[in-house]
Image: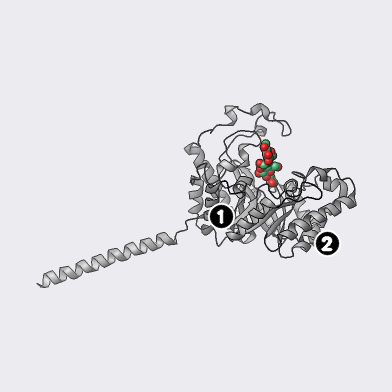
Amino acid sequence: MINTAKILSLLIVIILCISCDTEKKEKQKTNEPTTLKDNFKNNFLIGAALSNTQISGADKNAINLLEKEFNSITPENDMKWEQIHPEKDSFYFEIADKYVGLGLKENMHIVGHTLVWHSQLAPWVQNIKDSTELASTIKTHINKVVGRYKGKIDTWDVVNEALNEDGTLRESIFLNVMGEKYIAYAFKLAAHADPNAKLVYNDYNLWKPEKRAGVVRLVKQLQESGVKIDGVGMQAHWSLEGPSIEDIENSIIAYSQLGVKVSFTELDVTVLPNPWDLNGAAVEQSYEQYEGDPKMNPYPVKLTDSAQTQLAKRYQDIFNLFLKHQDKISRVTFWGVNDGSSWLNNWPIQGRTNHPLLFDRQFQQKEAYKTLLNLNN
Ligand code: G3I
């Protein structure tokens, strides 16, 4: 009798322990981060660039993934001058309104890209030769575009790609017609049009020491003349091999020492060979000769396992650096939602199959994604 009672109570204790343990495990499971934005919520914003097709709602899978994984958006092309202000007296806001509406609905950080850039500029602007006329054109553009989204767009890429690789100012139409004052002018106008928006200088190859020195000069000049600038955007179109973590780190430190935040605004990692890696291929030349060349398109169906692992390792190294300097970094934005929508499928050679992002063409998580989700932060 006693033995039976003892056995019964022992059984009850065992059952309670098992259920308690299962509950604990369930809890651990639900506490585990399940999305990118959740995993990095205490570190920095996680963004994605949206294509025209995605903003217009035609790519439902991309929007579903976006809403689940990301908390910041950037328009890949639809707020560029040629799109939004194609003629002197006509603005086209339809897609940009949809874009901002999507961000507001999902309570995301909304980026405006980009106000003053020599590329994808409307042809009518390119013909302006007079400094006063160009200044008044920039003023109308910034007042109208920034003004329309005042209080809605959180961060503006105010000036894009104003520097050469050696850190000197690029000979753009803006520099040639107005001189270097156009940069401060654009920042002042943006600050006036929306005093609460964060204002960023955005460029590529900002890990390069000479270009880094150019950015430091530019930001200091703005600051010394009392012009508001909140951040430096490092575009981050990188590859499996480079740039080195050390070069990136040196730039993060140099920019943050200026008292501005660093953001990684256009991150992707190409896994394909580039023509300029080949002997004798000059960057300026046309790459049409490589179109359809299987050597330049080694993964037309899917990435090999070893390339997946290499990509995952590269992203892991990059994000470990970002986490190390999280106090200096406000946002990390991927230049696309998934591999299928990446610009790198058509640049620098048309019609290739690149795999530079965290989600594949079927919107499935890649090894790189899983690696980032397991990072200890
Ligand atoms: O819209 C036309 C379409 O009507 C036409 O049929 C088609 C034929 O090629 O071209 C379409 O335009 C393309 C446009 O993207 C929209 O898809 C252009 O050819 C193409 O050159 C353009 O490329 C964009 C590129 O900027 C232009 O410089 C890429 O999508 C976009 O990802 C890229 O983004 C830039 C950032 O804004 C700044 N930093 C560098 C980054 C990569 O170049």
Identify the image quadrant of the N terminus: bottom left
The x, y position of residue 139, in whole percent, is 82, 56
Rate crowding at label 1 as few (under 14), some (14 to 19) or many (20 or more) other CA atoms within 10 Å: many
Image x and y of residue 32, in percent: 45, 59
Task: Assign ligand 1 to one image quadrant.
Answer: top right
Work out whether residue 254 can be spotted.
no
Which residue is more in the foreground, 364 or 268? 364
Q: Is residue 120 visible?
A: yes
What numbered label is drawn on residue 225? 2
Which residue occupies 55% across, 61% down?
41
Residue 315 vertical position relative to residue 272 in the rendered view, above or below: below
Q: Does the numbered disc 1 mark a residue whose Cβ is under 8 Å from ligand 1?
A: no
- Residue at the spot of label 1: 70
- In the image shown, does 103 or 35 lie closer to the viewer? 103
Residue 241 image-quadrant placement? top right
Q: In this view, does 62 lie to the left or right of 196?
A: left
* 93 sits to left or right of 40: right
**In the figure, is residue 136 to the left or right of 292?**
right
Looking at this rendering, what residue extends furthest in the bottom direction?
A: 2
* Disc 2: CA contacts within 10 A as few (<14), some (14-19) or many (>=20): few
Frontmost of labels 2 and 1 is 1
Could you tell me how far apart the alpha carbons at marks 2 and 1 are, in whole angstroms? Answer: 36 Å
Instruction: State the image quarter where residue 344 is shown.
Output: top right
* Number of on-image labels: 2
Regarding mark 1 in the picture, which secondary structure is present there? loop
Q: At label 1, which amino acid type do we have?
A: Phe
Q: Is residue 280 left or right of residue 25?
A: right
Name the secondary structure under disc 2. Answer: loop
Q: Nearer the viewer, residue 48 or 285?
A: 48
Please state the horizontal and vertical placement of residue 329, each as a whole percent of the image. Answer: 63, 58
Point out residue 272 in the picture as x, y percentages from the top left corner.
59, 36
